[in-house]
Image (cartoon, coloured by chain):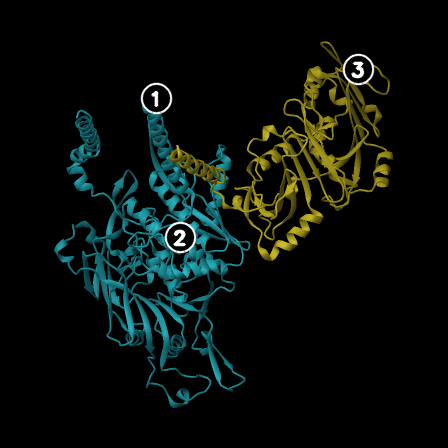
Amino acid sequence: MVKHNHNNRNRDLITLIAGVIIVILVNFIGSFAFHRFDLTSEKRYTISDNSKDLAANLDDIVYVKVYLEGDFPAGFKRLRDETREMLDEFRAYSNGFIEYEFINPSEDPDQKVREDIYKQLYKEGLRPTDLNVKEEDGTSNKIIWPGALVSYKGQEFPVQLLKSQMGVSPEMMLNGSIEALEYEFANAIHNLKVFEKPRVALIEGHGELDKVETASLAMSLAESYTVDRIAINEELSSLTERVIVDSTREYAVINKYDAIIIAKPTQKFSEKDKFVIDQYIMFGGRVVWLIDPVFASMDSLQNADVSMAIPQDLNLDDQLFTYGVRLNPTLIQDLQSAAIPVITGRVGNQPKQQLFPWFFFPLLTSANNHPIVNNLNAVKGEFTSTIDTIAKPRIRKTGLLKSSKYTKVSNTPTRISLGMLRYEPDQSQFNAGHQVSAVLLEGYFESVFKNRIAPEILNSNEVNFQQESKFNKMVVIADGDIAKNFVNPKTSQYYELGFDRFTNQQYGNNDFMLNVVNYLCDDSGLMGVRSKKLTIRLLDKTILKKDKFKWQLINSILPIGLIILFGLAHYYDRKKKYTK
Amino acid sequence: MKKNKTLLIVLVILLAVAAYFFATKNSNTLKTREGVLSDFAIEDTTTIDKIFIGNSTGENVTLTKGSGNDWIVDGKNKARPESISILMKTFARIAVKSPVSSAAFKNVVTSIATQSVKVEIYQGNDQPSKVYYVGESTQNHQGTYMLLEKAGVKSTEPFVMYIPGFYGYLTTRFYSNPLEWRDAAVFKYLAGEIKEIKVDYFKKPEESFTIKQNGLSTELYNNQTSQLVENFDSLTLKTYLSFFDKAYYEGVVLEMEQTKKDSIIASEPYFSIRVTDIFGKENKMVGYFIPNRNNPVSEDGTSYPYDLDRMYGYFNDELLVYIQYNMFDKYLLPKSYFNKK
């Protein structure tokens, strides 16, 4: 009998130990095996059909070097794991054409070697992040490179994995970055795959931003596009090409550029130039309008305390109205604004400077969850105006950028004075609510010259006048400075677009402009991936703070209590059973 | 018992699967590709004790680890320490830049098969631990095509290799001419190690001299008469001796026919320096002018007869090298320089 009990006990013990080991092993294997049951409501672990197609149609190895390896805070580890999972997801559809490697760029103990690697990564287009890491004896500074280099057929494309956003908590920023992973990788692969880069032109000839002022934008665009600067000069052939089709003996019109950017013109457009742009649009050309309906400049305030902001007539109102928007000759003042330095006195013989928020430089944020602006950092505007949309059938209007709810709209002409900085703003005046200053128009545009042109042009076989466009898109922004990078007047060196030299803050201007052009030129629907939204399920810190002790108790005492209860119940049950 | 048996079978299967995943776990998916070898880097280069480098023309060199940090070229001469250091750093830090594109794949494989430099790395065994086949550089010169072989099995795929943080290609680090690997040191003595220095000027034999060190005394002799020079400045002489702590030749004369080399060696030299150390070992450098080929002219328009920067040097009666005036001028002092002023 004793032997029998002993055997039973041994058998139970083996069963228990084996069971525990099996559970551990299953979990361990599960951490390696790539199979995903995506039970999340937002399908966060399922890539879009566009991305699947992109991966499936690869014909050569895409090699991704991810520089997120090493010892860093939990948030970045999460970004690393999500990156790995995203790459695994792409890899699963790529027929073995996607390979990756996680690299720690700070691995080498030699500081010079590390610095050389950092310099190389910077040159390749990646940007570092400074981290303050808490240690036992204080804090230390750590540089991490949350980015990846994607190479394909000997070409490389940088992908910035961490998307910085102003005024957003680190958790939200990481979440936004994770949301953007699929698009970032898909976009990199797409860019590398495109054999012939799409063509983009910056228009000149109407006092637009010059070459140095758009140098940063041109450089960023050049990674994915062939960028030109062209003057229309009232020539039809500047934006379109007309070729005779052999079979029909008629002229076919081909756009020379996939998109054009009209950045902050200051002179009137002639009717002929408008006609060239209009017909370019009618034949499917995409346009980014960056228009200042009001003339106002900080340069005027350098010499005088007061300057007047006056409406600016560029002869574009009727054209934009026909397409579906009206730029208002107003100026936005926003309590959420960028700062400018002002001399407030002197210390010894040195001028003392202080930064003040300058309400005419609003920090514009995403108006919605559209792919162009989803998870976008704040965009810095300078003397931004408002936009109204016009009821046009077959045109869908989507607001892209908006001011904060603490906005004041001033009609022009209006006085701008640095003296305003001396006084606390009257918050009750900043009650206009969110104001839209960038709009996406999509649909079938009507020509502004419809019913307006001479019969000889209307009937010209070569001109091939179009009254209405096919499905087309354009973006209208009521602030030309959004595309303008700062240029150091002494050295003629330019800063990165959106970089605020006073606060060393990087605003989202560059990303916004790239997204706009990418969206306009992208007919594959890849940009749609950017709108993917992941729900961040964070703990409510207020409740957490209030009921901290309660939750601590529940978490520590309740499980132990339950086990004790279970043990007691079991003990009494056995006692009752065997004492009979 | 039957229940336990089933449980144990499940356990064994799960253990095997877990072991497989653990063994293949890495953060580099290239390593999981069948037949593909991409782990070029050698974590601990101190374990490397022999390197063989050979090119497709049959030229090769074997570098073996000697005592201390010294490396020996083909079992005879000391290797250039800086070149060995660069090679070790390359082994330690080399990394995959990218796979070779399918368009270039065939050409790269053919090129590696026919024209590559073979680098065998030994780590304590008779068989190399890794063999690199180093091909040409990529079009932008920022990468080098390489193929790895381990345990006699070649990778099915070559890779574009680079060193993170370094701009350029790696081919030039793997040269196979033993002469290029030789340590370029000509004289490397502490003043106390020198027994005798004999300097001869063939066009001005009256300025030739010999310095002899014997115990604590240092003496200067006239080479023509073999007489002791009485009136010399001992401090100047001691300073002169201290110059012999490091003298290097610039490089070996490689691209020259042997007949031309022979005619240079047979011509009248400009100088000869022979240094004998306290152990009786001798190092000799004989210098010859190089005719002025680049044709620089002086301010008055006259052409210099000889190259203004370098001379030929015949080192230890075996190696024709280039030496620079910049390095050797300080050794070429006339006997009269040591006279007491």
**Mark 3 and 2 residues: CB-CB less than 8 Å, in contact?**
no
User: Disc 2: which chain?
Assistant: A
> Where does label 2 land, which residue?
A496
Q: Tell me which residue sits at (34%, 36%) in the image.
A: A132
Q: Which mark is residue A3?
A: 1
Q: Seen in the image, is B127 located left or right of residue A271?
A: right
User: Residue A376, position in %: x, y?
Assistant: 32, 55
Q: Quadrant of residue A432?
A: bottom left
Q: Which label lies toward us, 1 or 2? A: 1
The verdict on a common chain for dots 3 and 2 is no
Q: Quadrant of residue A526?
A: bottom left
Q: Which chain is cyan?
A: A
Looking at the rendered image, the quarter that the N terminus of chain B falls into is top left
User: Disc 1: which chain?
Assistant: A
Q: Seen in the image, is A55 located left or right of residue B170?
A: left
> Where does label 3 land, which residue?
B229
User: Residue B151, position in %: x, y?
Assistant: 64, 37
User: Residue A249, position in %: x, y?
Assistant: 51, 87
Q: Which label lies toward us, 3 or 1? A: 1
Query: Quick one: SS at disc 2?
Result: loop
Label 3 – label 1 distance at C-alpha: 110 Å
Q: Which label lies toward us, 3 or 2? A: 2
Q: Tell me which residue sits at (34%, 34%) in the image.
A: A133
User: Disc 3: which chain?
Assistant: B
- Are there few (<14), some (14-19), or many (20+) residues within 10 Å of tag 2? many
Label 1 – label 2 distance at C-alpha: 82 Å
Dot placed on the residue nearer the N-terminal end, 1 or 2 = 1
Check the image and report above or below for A154 versus B76: below
